[in-house]
Amino acid sequence: MAYAADVARAPRAITLLDEPLVLWRDARGVPHVFRDVCVHRGTALSLGCVEGDELVCAYHGWRYRGDGACAAIPQLADPTRVPARARAFVYTAQERYGIVWAALEPPARPLPEVPELDDPAWRAVRTGPFAWTCDASRQVENFTDFGHFAFVHEGLLGDRSNAVVAPYEISVDGPVLRYAYGRPDAPNTEAFPVFAAEARKDAMRRTRYALHLPYTIVEHIDWGGPDGLVYFFASQPVARDRCVGYCVVARNYNLDQPDDVIQAFERTIFGQDQRVVESQRPDRVPFDVAAELHLTFDAVAVAYRRAMRAHGFGSA
Ligand code: FES
Ligand SMILES: [Fe+2]
């Protein structure tokens, strides 16, 4: 995946589950995802360029259409007499929420519905992307973890004198874990005025999470009034020890605030998390619940491990 704004007509190389891919847009702006390998001599198609509706290989100029068919081989006397085997390997591409998504197999489920991200009354900001050297499961689990706010994000999302995690319930709805959590609000700092003005020092920040297996989280925050903040987070599993997090943050207040305030805030927060999470061993969440030590307030981590195993995403 990639932010849609970063997928221009120039092809872009990405990696998904160790598979090298190339993202590109045709003349109408429709995104395409191919395996980043030319069938002729194995050259990375991402080294090429887009001309009209065709991706042109950098080595010998073979031209591929969006459906993967090769339209022309310049070395042939008649360049259009293309053998049927001359094709790019096409994967599923979809553009939604300002992100171009790639899937190695036909998607088993649609993307989560997040109406706020399509609503002009909300302002959505792309943050990151956040490339970490760990498995996507560790990055996702960190996003679900309440206990670290007081320590890793002291002063921004929590405070050490108030580290107790209040009890909460989790419901499991097929491949979606839902839970809600209320906690005393951390007031805005001068550097990062990102939370709603209605939030006061004594306010409760009410947070609802939906964790869509394996690596997507939708988080809704409010303070009891109409102001709302939505986090849409998805981690791209690049390799067993690498991932890239995409985090779109939408709000229906402070609509004139420049995007770089939230971008800088999330850069700080994710940076604080990164050094801790990249140090975790193993790089991937051990899906056997006996493998680490879980206390009651770690219920999300336990539910995530169980659900990942139940849905075939995580072997122990
Ligand atoms: S390797 Fe791509 S055209 Fe020859
Ligand atoms: Fe964090």
Image (cartoon, grey):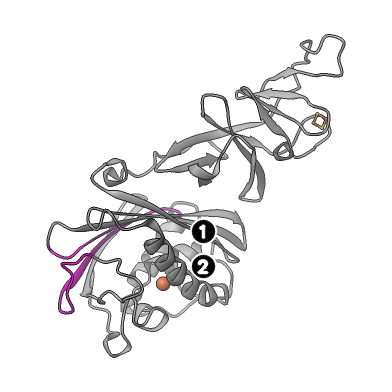
Residue 170 seen in this snapshot: no
Kindly identify which residue carries mark 1. Answer: 314
Crowding at label 2, few (<14), some or many (≥20) Cα neighbours within 10 Å? many
- At mark 2, the secondary structure is loop
Please provide the residue range marked out in magenta.
196-224
Kindly identify which residue carries mark 2. Answer: 285
Q: Residue furthest left?
A: 225
* Disc on the earlier residue, 1 or 2: 2
Crowding at label 1, few (<14), some or many (≥20) Cα neighbours within 10 Å? some
Give the percent coordinates (x, y) of residue 14: 62, 47
Quadrant for the C terminus in the image: bottom right
Mark 1–mark 2 CB contact (< 8 Å): yes
Viewer-side label of 1, 2: 2
Asked whether 134 or 292 is in front, the reply is 134
Q: Amino acid at mark 1?
A: Gly
Q: Taking 311 as reference, is 57 left or right?
A: right
Give the percent coordinates (x, y) of residue 26: 57, 27
Asked whether 180 or 176 is in front, the reply is 180
Give the percent coordinates (x, y) of residue 135: 56, 63
Q: Residue at x 37, y 50 (%)?
A: 175
